[in-house]
Image (cartoon, rainbow, N blue to C red):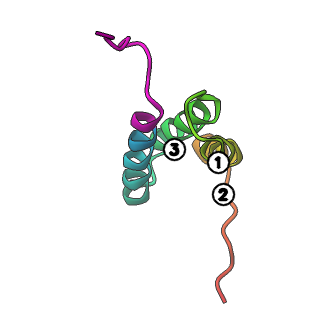
């Protein structure tokens, strides 16, 4: 019987945590949560078991969340 290594983090677990963090960030705007989101995005972007589309999307979003985490203003689309 294969016992999973607790040091290995499954891609779906990281994705679930990312959704949780993003939900709470939307309520609080906390920069610490933005940093956690940025790190989770980076983790998924590099995760060998994550689907390619997830890795590519996370890699594309990582920079934006990193800027938010470091206090740089996020570009907001104008609503017409």
Callout 3 touching callout 2 (CB < 8 Å): no
Residue with the mark numbered 1: 53
Mark pair 3, 1: CA separation: 22 Å
In magenta, the rendered stretch is 1-14
Residue closer to the observer: 41 or 31: 41
Left or right of 67 on screen, residue 47: left
Relative placement, left or right, of 80 versus 69 is right
Q: CA distance from mark 1 to mark 2?
A: 24 Å
Q: Quadrant of residue 66?
A: top right
Q: Position of residue 70 (x, y in %)?
A: 62, 40
Magenta stretch holds residue 67: no
Say which residue label 2 marks.
Answer: 74
Residue furthest toward the bottom? 80
Judging by the rendered image, the residue that carries numbered circle 3 is 34
Q: Residue at x 55, y 30 (%)?
A: 49
Q: Residue at x 37, y 59 (%)?
A: 27
Of mark 1 and mark 2, the one earlier in the sequence is 1
Real-space CA distance between mark 3 and mark 2, rounded to the nearest whole angstrom: 11 Å
Mark 3 and mark 2 lie on one chain; the one further toward the N terminus is 3
Please tell me how crowded label 3 is: few (under 14), some (14-19), or many (20+) other residues with Cα within 10 Å: many
Residue 42 x, y percent position in the rendering: 61, 34
Q: Position of residue 64 (x, y in %)?
A: 67, 49
State the residue in front, 45 or 25. 45
């Amino acid at each position: 019987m294969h016992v999973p290594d607790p040091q290995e983090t499954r891609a779906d677990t990281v994705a679930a945590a990312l959704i949780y963090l993003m939900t709470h960030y939307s309520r609080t705007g906390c920069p610490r949560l933005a940093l956690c989101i940025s790190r989770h995005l980076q983790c998924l972007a590099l995760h060998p078991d994550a689907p390619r589309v997830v890795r590519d999307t996370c890699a594309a979003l990582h920079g934006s969340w990193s800027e938010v985490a470091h206090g740089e203003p996020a570009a907001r689309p104008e609503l017409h």
